[in-house]
Image (cartoon, helix red, strand yellow):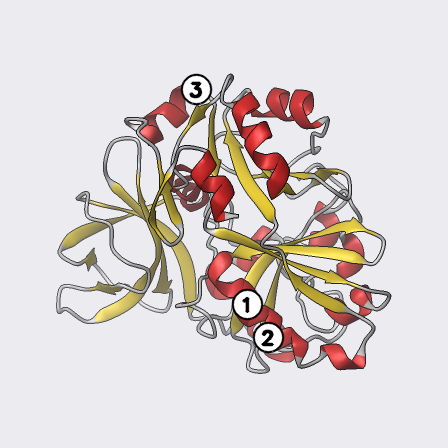
Amino acid sequence: MMDWIAATGGRQEAEYRVTFDTSEAPRRALDTTVMTPLAHLGVLDVEGPDAERFLQGQTSAQVSLADGDFAPLTCFCTPKGRMLANAQLLRVGPAHYRLIMHASLVASLAEHLKKFAPFYKVELRERDDLALLGLIGHEAAALAEVRFDALPSGPWHQAGNDELQVLAHPGPRPRLLVCLPADRAEQAWQWLREHATPVGNAVWRLHDIQAGLAWLDADLGDTYLPQMINWEALGGISFKKGCYTGQEVVARAHFRGQVKKRLYRAQLEGDRLPQAGAPITDTNDKAKGEVLAAELDAYGQAEILAVLSIKEDIGPLSVEGQTLKLLKLPYPIERVDPEALATTAG
């Protein structure tokens, strides 16, 4: 996959970060259609006659809803309800499911699931032979339809076939994620760049932040209940399905109102990007939460997603000396059943 990214002309500045010489990339994303290699995301496939039954016992999604059209959010938890990974689940074909998540979690989730796999006719495959690219902007849909002959009906839906999938993601501007074989990616990229501007994947990650969508990485696993990243407000938890690992704790936290922390959007008064896990402190330098993601916006200021306590008035906050200002989330904090989302275009 990294060979394909090198062929785009981008620079791999960090393990999961790609940049281009394009100036003011976030601002360009406001004005035109852009494209980016999604180097921070990875793919785990689950295949076999028992694939649906296997996943049903491990994931928060109602697996039958992943029908080749609806592609729900989901997560995998410990018995204590803490998330090991969160992902998008799509069905590629009969008895073939695909999970898209942060690349740093693919191997560890596969290793975790392999503990249960011997009891099922199922195979787990880490798909390093696939490429993920993102399109952002009002021309994204037209480009996907012309180049890939696939256009999802709305956010968290998919289109395509068993070789190539196009997924619609929410955000302040239209967004499409394309999953295709790596040996086809360079040709597709060269065609797309005639119509869209290449930018670094920080632009895609910024749109995730602005959509209130947090993707856990290897440093944040086994830390949060799903509700602490607003997963039930995004349709990432089915409360109508049967048991799965961690289900009792997740359901109890929901029905008894025991969630003490929530995901917030915020802006920092400065341009220094904190690392994931950086503490958020009050005026007494006491930690009140932590940063989950951070990127610079179109105006050069840091925007973040943060997990903060909801049980008290915690007053003015800062991150590494930069004052924090809370921003509005683009969705209400209330339960959204994926069963309802599956019947609509997002």
- Residue type at mark 3: give it: Thr
Which secondary structure lies at badge 1? helix
Q: Which residue is mark 3?
A: 32
- Residue type at mark 2: give it: Glu
Are the residues tagged 1 and 2 within 8 Å (C-beta)?
A: yes
The residue shown at (64%, 61%) is 237
- Seen in the picture, residue 99 relative to 7 is either above or below; the reply is below
Spot occupied by residue 117 in the image (x, y as percentages of width and height) = 73, 77
Q: First in sequence: mark 2 or mark 3?
A: 3
Is residue 155 visible in the rendered structure shown here?
Answer: no
Specify whether 170 is left or right of 322.
Answer: right
Give the mark toward the camera: 2 or 3.
Answer: 2
- Residue type at mark 1: give it: Ala
Q: First in sequence: mark 3 or mark 1?
A: 3
Q: Nearer the viewer, residue 181 or 302?
A: 181
Mark 2: few, some, or many residues within 10 Å (few <14, many ≥20)? few
Specify whether 292 is left or right of 82.
Answer: left
Are the residues tagged 3 and 1 within 8 Å (C-beta)?
A: no
Mark 3: few, some, or many residues within 10 Å (few <14, many ≥20)? some
The residue shown at (67%, 20%) is 146
Distance CA(mark 1)–CA(mark 2): 6 Å
Q: Quadrant of residue 19?
A: top left
Which secondary structure lies at badge 2? helix
Q: Which residue is mark 1?
A: 107
The residue shown at (50%, 25%) is 137
Specify whether 118 is left or right of 228.
Answer: right
Is residue 234 visible in the rendered structure shown here?
Answer: yes
Q: Nearer the viewer, residue 338 or 28?
A: 28
Spot occupied by residue 131 in the image (x, y as percentages of width and height) = 57, 44
Q: Which mark is residue 111?
A: 2
Mark 1: few, some, or many residues within 10 Å (few <14, many ≥20)? some
